[in-house]
Structures are given as structure tokens and as C-alpha cells.
Image (cartoon, grey):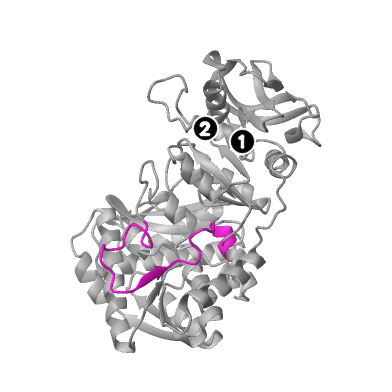
Amino acid sequence: MKNKELVLIIDFYGQYNQLIARRVRECNVYSEIVPFDTPLEKIKEKKPVGIIFTGGPSSVYLPDAPKCDKGIFDLGIPVLGICYGMQLMTHLLGGTVDRADKREYGTIDVSIDNTSDIFKGFDSKNACLMSHTDFVSKLPEGFRVIGTTPHCPVAAIENKEKKLYGIQFHPEVNNTVNGTHIIRNFLYNVCGCNGLWKMSSFVEDSIKYLKEKIGDKKALCALSGGVDSSVAAVLLHKAIGKNLTCIFVDHGLLRKNEGDEVEEVFRNQFDINLIRVNAKDRFLQKLSGVTDPETKRKIIGEEFIRVFEEEAKKIGTVDYLVQGTIYPDVIESGLGKGTTIKSHHNVGGLPDYVDFKEIVEPLRDLFKDEVRKTGLELGIPENLVYRQPFPGPGLAIRIIGDITDDKLNILKDADAIFREEIKIAKLDKEINQYFAVLTNLKSVGVMGDDRTYDYTIALRAVTTTDFMTATWTKIPYDILEKVSSRIVNEVKHVNRVVYDITGKPPATIEWE
């Protein structure tokens, strides 16, 4: 969406960089994340109304610490530095940052000056998440202290004249009380934002843009049946109608009975051109003996494109390929600077050569919750909009090791039991994502009087607001016990069930 109100998030490898972007958007202001070494000219071209520096793991005084162009401070654009971002602002503008005698970590009461524009409406103390080893020991010229703690004499700073602000704590996390209010104050009190970023506007602008871009030409949508591709399909359908053809490639890696459910929804509930391709054997043949998760993703991504190319030739000229790529896909695929966490089917899994004029990704700038809001704006039924997230490569990345038809059946049955019991317990709306994983671990078990040597199923359930960070869900023991009992008794070749209690980070939500 083309939006005049843009806030740039300059990333210094911050753990919570995506959360900052989400909080800005929650305040109805559009945000983008760019790497710390983005050229100054490129920043000026984007014409941001405000800039936010993220936190980061480095110390600003070290030679290899990530640093931005000092010229940012001469642009006349308001800047908010968070944690490392505040220290970097201090360092670049002539202040001093030193190693602290005592590290400050956890939720701590910060004494604040609520006459400052970023703290307006606050009490004199506010609980905030601190996470730092370094501290500001000398302020740059023109700055004053607006926040302190018992162990951190400079917890927040401002240069009101130049509209430069720094806070040592993290307002983007839930641990900081009223954290989003601090960001809102920066956006509205300092940057003068009007709050133009809304899903209704996004839908309206996107439909108009897609109509103008695609016109009377043909588009082919990669429909998986998941939330992202479903919303992308309906958005395109609203824009170009029958010029859109949705190809649903059933690679055999979907959840139990899901292929039939997808076909039912899109063929009967929506008046969308739908072609279902049953390509299970083709995909399994390509994946035979493959154990590396990145290789699985690349193979599946390429086969998807090959199938689409073949189907496109059958229906005539197709100029555009539509995909449901969303912003976390782009970020986690490492398309900017930093480390690649994993490639995504919609992003990193594409082959270099694609036999289409162009790939269209209408949801590329949206986070998951924004995609759901867009779906509701488009009139998509709530049960489809809030469907469980499902990766493009499907169960291929929920089977650790090589993939066979027998393993697929084991996982489909175990996963169906888990999802059924979660729904019976009425936890399906509370847990943001839950699924089963077939590990490549076999262990000894006893069933009746017989010794077994069979697979271990891992259960995964997480609670999250943005899918960039997540905590493991504390499902009641009696429900886990019932799920485990049913899986072991009803699914052949499984004799052990374990529950994953790892958050994100350090783990990802998926196992591969």
C-alpha cells in the first residue's frame, strides 16, 4: 500500500525488531524494517515521517558494532532509539557509553518525567523491561534525562528541539506497561502522524492497484487453502474476477481430508475459477530419500512452480503468478541483511527461472493478524480466516527425515487426533497454532506383552500475537494425557508422545 505516513524501523539485529514494526502498525501508522547500513539517500527517498532504531546485541563502542549513517540526525526527521538504538544515538552524537558494573535485566520501575512528549499521560513511575549491559554515562550536547532507575541513571533521554528521543528499555514487549502508548506518543506527539494505516484502506487501495496493474490480463493464484493464499485469492478475485484462475496443488502433504475441504470452500462458497491438481505421487517421488529441510523446501517450491507452468499452458496465456507471501516470510528468509533463519516456500524456495511475466504478492507487507483482518474485510467466513496456520511445504517439514507415504499417514492420523481433542476442549480459539510432528526417533516400548520399536510423535502448541515470537502453550495435563493415549492406541507404529515446551526464540514454531 502506498502510504504517505511511513515510519522506518532501522534494524541493528534487534531481537524484537518485528515487534516494533507491529506496535507501530497497531497505532495505525505504516512501518517498514530496513537494515542498519541502508544508504542515507535511500532513506531520504522513502520520506519517512519518523525513524525508530531497534535494540541489538552489540556494544556501540566496539569497532565492528553495527552503525547507521550519522547524517540521519541532520534530516530533521524525529528519531526514537530503543536500548542499543539509544546508546548508538548517544555515541554518534558525542556522548559516552560505558560498560555497566551491574547488568539490568527484567521488569523494573522507571521513574519518568511525564512532561516529555513521549511520556504524556503517564504516572511518575512505569514498569518497563530492561535488558542491557552497557549504559549512557555522558549525554550528548542538547539532551536531558527524562527517565531513571536505581541502577541506571540514564534510562530515557530527549532533545526536544531536534525531536530525538532514546529509551533504554523495550516498549514493544508486553512486559513494559503502556509500552505501545510510548510508541503512540512518539508517532502522534512527536512525528505528527494522522493514523492512515487501516485494513479497510488497504483492501480498497489494493483492489484499485491490482485492477490497474493486471487489467484484462490473466492471473494464476497459488492456492494452498491456508489463510494467506486464501486471502490473496479473494483479494485478486475482487479485483479481476474471472481473469483469475486458482490452481490448488494437492501435493499429498496436506492435513487429513484437507484437500477435499479446500475444494469445497472455494468451488462452492466462492465463485472462483478453481483447478485441483492431484500431484501427490509426483511430489513424493521428488522428495524420495531427501532429509535436509532446506532441500525439501527448495524441491517443493520448484515443483509448485513447474506444476503451475504446466497448468498455465493448458488454460492459455497467463501473465501473473499470485502468491500469499506475508511480511514474516520475507523477514525470516533473510532477504535483507542478517542471518537466514529458514527459507519460506513463498520466498526462498522459488527457482531462479519462472515462466510468468511477474509474481504478484499482494500481502507481502502484512503481518499475520493484518492478513486475518484483511480476510474479514473481504467477507471471507471467520472459520476460514482463523484457520490454523499451515506452511507451504505442508507436512514435509513436520516429518523429520525422509518422507514416505506410510509416514504421511501416521502423521495425518496423529495430527487429526490432536486437533480434534483441542477443539473438544474448546482451546482451539485460545491456542494460536498447534500440530503434531513425526520425529525420526524410534524407541523401545511395550504394548500388551510385546516389545515395540516405533516412532515418537511430538506435539507443538504455541501462544503468540504476531508469530515472530511465541511461548509454548500450557495445555492441561489431562488433555495431553488423552491425546497421547489416543495416538498410541489408534495410530499404528507410534509408541511414544512428547510435548515441545520451547518458546520462539530460541526455537522456531515449526521444527524444520
Report the front residue among 248 and 183: 183
Mark 2 vs mark 1: which is more N-terminal? Answer: 2
Residue annotated with mark 2? 71
Please determine whether, in this image, residue 140 is positioned above or below residue 357.
Answer: above
Tell me where residue 395 sits by quadrant.
Answer: bottom left
Residue 471 in view (yes/no):
no
Question: Disc 1 marks which amino acid?
Answer: Val
Q: Nearer the viewer, mark 2 or mark 1?
A: 2
At mark 2, the secondary structure is: helix
Report the front residue among 118 and 445: 118
Residue under the image location 38 percent in, 50 percent down: 335
Along the horizontal axis of the image, is 228 left or right of 373? Answer: left
* Separation of residues labelled 2 and 1 (CA atoms): 12 Å
Pointers 2 and 1 in contact (C-beta within 8 Å): no
Res. 79 mark: 1
The magenta span reads 344-371
Q: Position of residue 363 (x, y in %)?
A: 50, 64
Q: Position of residue 149 (x, y in %)?
A: 68, 19
**Quadrant location of the N terminus?**
bottom right
Residue under the image location 58 percent in, 33 percent down: 74
Few, some or many residues within 10 Å of mark 2 (<14, 14–19, 20+):
few
Q: Position of residue 86 (x, y in %)?
A: 58, 27
Few, some or many residues within 10 Å of mark 1 (<14, 14–19, 20+):
many
At mark 1, the secondary structure is: strand
Along the horizontal axis of the image, is 80 left or right of 325? Answer: right
Q: Position of residue 498 (x, y in %)?
A: 41, 49
Residue under the image location 69 percent in, 39 percent down: 186
Question: Disc 2 marks which amino acid?
Answer: Gly
Along the horizontal axis of the image, is 503 left or right of 130? Answer: left
The stretch drawn in magenta includes residue 364: yes
Res. 141 mark: none
